């Protein structure tokens, strides 16, 4: 680690993944997405800090975190962003499935609305 990076407190390779994972898992817990098994790995990503692929039928997800620092990067915000993708994944996958019943879509929408109602603070 260079002296410059140490001074700025920037997370380095390995530390980046650990920080991202810790923040992501806090949001996963907050969003009550305990049933998902999530795998994390560092990878080379050209256009983003991180990306997620989900399989809501089997409650699995794979998160890839860029293995090098991006300009204007915010790992914490990226972890939150990818966790929100996990939150809406089931709804998105149902919407893409032409065989989803209206009842399945409504139940999934209701689940998402309940979670968002809990997460969004009341207006004072």
Image (cartoon, helix red, strand yellow):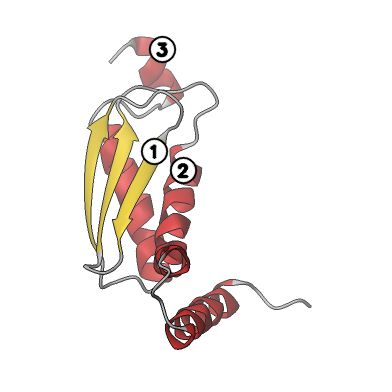
Look at mark 2 in the image and give the residue it sits on: 78
Q: Residue at x 50, y 30 (%)?
A: 73
Q: How much space separates mark 3 and mark 2, taking CA atoms?
A: 23 Å
Q: Is residue 89 left or right of residue 34?
A: right
Q: Secondary structure at mark 2?
A: helix
Look at mark 1 in the image and give the residue it sits on: 50
Q: Is residue 55 left or right of residue 116?
A: left
Using the rendered view, name the quadrant where residue 50 is placed.
Answer: top left
Q: Residue at x 70, y 78 (%)?
A: 122
Q: Earlier in the sequence, mark 3 or mark 2?
A: 3
Looking at the image, is mark 2 or mark 1 nearer the viewer?
1
Q: How much space separates mark 2 and mark 1, taking CA atoms?
A: 7 Å
Residue 22: percent from the left, percent from the top? Answer: 31, 51
Using the rendered view, name the quadrant where residue 44 is placed.
Answer: top left
Q: Secondary structure at mark 3?
A: helix
Query: Relative to the observer, which residue lies in front, 74 or 63?
Result: 63
Look at mark 3 in the image and give the residue it sits on: 4
Question: Cβ–Cβ below 8 Å for labels 2 and 1?
Answer: yes
Looking at the image, is mark 3 or mark 2 nearer the viewer?
2
Query: Relative to the observer, which residue lies in front, 109 or 11?
Result: 109
């Amino acid at each position: 680690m260079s002296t410059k990076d140490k001074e700025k407190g920037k997370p380095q390779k390995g530390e980046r993944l650990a920080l991202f994972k810790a923040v992501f898992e806090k949001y996963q817990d907050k969003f009550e997405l305990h049933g998902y098994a999530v795998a994390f790995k560092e990878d080379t990503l050209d256009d983003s800090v991180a990306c997620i692929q989900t399989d809501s039928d089997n409650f699995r997800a794979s998160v890839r975190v860029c293995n090098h620092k991006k300009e204007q990067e915010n790992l914490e915000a990226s972890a939150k962003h990818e966790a929100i993708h996990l939150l809406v994944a089931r709804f998105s996958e149902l919407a893409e499935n032409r065989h989803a019943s209206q009842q399945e879509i409504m139940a999934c929408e209701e689940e998402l609305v309940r979670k968002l109602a809990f997460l969004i603070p009341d207006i004072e």
